[in-house]
Amino acid sequence: MDTRSFRKWQTLLVLAILCVWALPPAIAQTPLASQPSPATNYVVGAQDMLTITSYDQADLSGKFTVEADGTFTYPMIGRVKAGGMTLRQVEAQVKKQLKDEGFFNNPQITVSMDQYRSQKIFVVGEVRTPGPYPLSGDMNLIEALARAGSTLPTASGEAVIVHPTSEHVTGPVLPNQEDADNIVRIDLRDLQNGSLSQNASLRDGDTIFVPRAESVYVFGQVKNPGAYALQQKNTTVLQALSLAGGVTDRGSTGRIRIARMVKGEKQEFRVKLSDIVQPGDTIIVQERFF
């Protein structure tokens, strides 16, 4: 081996070692073969399309659509039940029928998902592209919101997951106080800050509802007066002023008033920068005395 080839081999070896060191410990110590596919636990249903690969006979490989009765037709063995089964169970069923009918002693096949069609979720509210989406594998909240194009600037800091109360759901179901046991509320800011415990798994028929944020109004001596969405709880006066670009050179942070409806009556009172605002408040920044 010449010097140039040796150096090239040495460089590749060092890069390979660095790549292994860069992996998180849980991943670096887990063999790839032992990591389950996200679709492993997916329950197959009508209209799903399966890809079956045969290593014994090439012409047995192909794509097969599950029909309304939960079965599909496979060469040589005819009807195979798939509805209500996981991919591994379907795989075992095909192998069993091939073996029982005497075609192979030890069939070598794999079954995977080609198109998810039987299960769906609904994403509605303050997202860019609301609508139904196929439920694929072990889909979670982050994936669902990403498919819907993420949340809008007008969205609140919360997502509400409504689990269906019946088996056959044809459209989105909005949260109802009577079904509190079937509702999960997720703080999107915790999720954005890396709290994966908030990244809930989804199931067939779930509705993800992202409500519109309530507004606060900022007027007077601020740079950009107007209405602003309260996207987090316990927003202070100072934070609300920052949404409006802050106080102008003529404004006084010591002369701030809030107009608020209390029991149907409008009330005004002075506030400090650390006070908490309420939805619907009107913040008025007055001019300096000199």
Image (cartoon, rainbow, N blue to C red):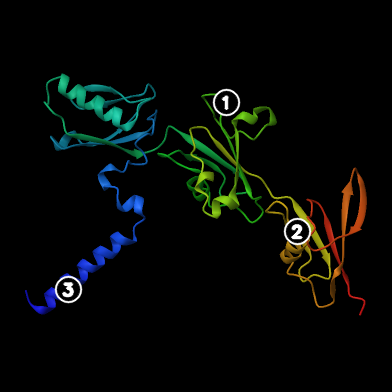
Question: How many marks are shown on the rendered structure?
Answer: 3
Secondary-structure class at tag 1 = loop
Determine crowd level at label 2: few under 14, some 14-19, many 20+ residues with C-alpha closer than 10 A: some
Picture coordinates of residue 218, whole percent (x, y): 80, 62
- In the rendered image, the residue lying farthest to the left is 1
Q: Residue at x 82, y 54 (%)?
A: 281
Q: Quadrant of the N terminus?
A: bottom left
Q: Quadrant of the C terminus?
A: bottom right
Which quarter of the picture shows residue 182? top right
Which numbered disc covers residue 8?
A: 3
Picture coordinates of residue 86, whole percent (x, y): 34, 30
Hey, what amino acid is under mark 3? Lys
Identify which residue, 96 or 268, lies in the foreground. 268
Which numbered disc covers residue 165?
A: 1
Hey, what amino acid is under mark 2? Thr
Q: Residue at x 84, y 57 (%)?
A: 282
Of badges 3 and 1, nearer the viewer stands 3
Marks 3 and 1, Cα distance to the nearest angstrom?
62 Å
Hey, what amino acid is under mark 1? Thr
Q: Earlier in the sequence, mark 3 or mark 1?
A: 3
Q: Is residue 74 visible?
A: no
Determine crowd level at label 1: few under 14, some 14-19, many 20+ residues with C-alpha closer than 10 A: few
Q: Where is 95 relative to 200, above or below?
A: above
**In this figure, which residue is indicated by the disc labeled 2?**
236
Q: Is residue 224 left or right of residue 265?
A: left
Q: Earlier in the sequence, mark 3 or mark 2?
A: 3
Picture coordinates of residue 105, whole percent (x, y): 11, 26
Q: Residue at x 75, y 61 (%)?
A: 240
Q: Is residue 226 left or right of residue 170?
A: right
